[in-house]
Structures are given as C-alpha cells and as structure tokens.
Amino acid sequence: MALADECSLVVRLTTTAPHRTPRHGQKFRPLAIETIGVPEVISTSERMTFRKDISSLREVEDKTIGYPPNSTAQYALDAAIGVYRLDRSKIKPVPLAPSEIVAAWKGGDIDGAYAWDPASQQLVANGGLKIFPQ
C-alpha cells in the first residue's frame, strides 16, 4: 500500500507490464505486477439511443445528443457523423457523464445519446430506441 501513496498506476491494454508514473522528480521504475484480462467488446455495449420519433441516424440533424467526453463513445459519435456525412453545424453535442445523460434524457434536455450500459439501457427503458449501431 505504500506504493499507492507514492505514485499512480498506469494501466494500458497494449502493454504487458503496468508502470509507475514518476512524480516529483522520481525516476521510472517498472512494477512487478502482471494483470490478465479481456476487454469488453465496445460495439456490444456502446450505442446511440434516441427518442422513438427518430428511427435512423440520418434524422439526428437539428437534435441534441449527449455523450461522455474524452471517451470511445465520443469518438464513435464523431465517426458516425462523418461516415453518414451529417451536417455537424446542425447537431448539438452535449458533453455529459453517463449518469447526467440519463438525468438529461428524463428531463427532456437531450433528444438522444451515444453512451454505454447501463446508461443506454436506462434510455431504452425510458422510451428510447437504439438506432446505431444496428
């Protein structure tokens, strides 16, 4: 536990060994820790969900879309807008944490969201329709 007080731990999917992040002039020292795990398949947990009057991605222009900032969901939303050649100036993206997405949905502040479970499940449970990916 002394290490937890002295440094932070960096976890990467692309590395075989986590390492300490040097702080306050400390030198880099590898940790003798090995973690094995299988990352979740993102396409099965992230989705774009909209109110039931919107049935396709082409209908999201002039809509407000919540998304978790600095996440794969933000990247996927941006990629979907580009792939479908939607007019970015007609879409209002709103950065929100997943719990804030659910609250904004229930309050009628957003028309849809690109998020992962359980937030996306809660949108569907509250009248949402999964429109992307299908």
Image (cartoon, helix red, strand yellow):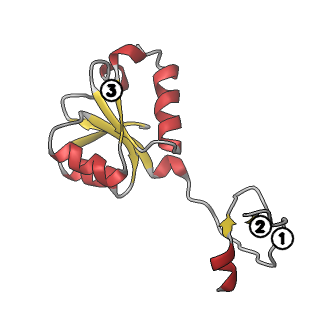
Up/down of 6 relative to 63, above or below? below
Mark pair 2, 3: CA separation = 44 Å
Residue depicted at 23% across the width and 42% down the height: 128
The amino acid sitting under disc 3 is Ser
Q: Residue furthest bottom?
A: 1
Q: Which mark is residue 19?
A: 2
Q: CA distance from mark 1 to mark 3?
A: 49 Å
For the residues labelled 2 and 1, the Cα–Cα distance comes to 5 Å
Quadrant in which the C terminus appears:
top left
Name the element at disc 2.
strand
Which comes sooner in the sequence, label 2 or label 1? 2
Q: Nearer the viewer, residue 128 or 27?
A: 27
Q: For residue 29, which quarter of the picture? A: bottom right
Mark 1 residue type: Pro
Do the residues bearing badges 2 and 3 touch, measured as CB atoms within 8 Å? no
Residues packed near mark 1 inside 10 Å, few (<14), some (14 to 19) or many (20 plus): few
Mark 3, residue position: 56
Residue at 84 percent of width and 65 percent of height = 28
Mark 2 vs 3, N-terminal side: 2
Q: Regarding mark 3 in the picture, which secondary structure is present there?
A: loop
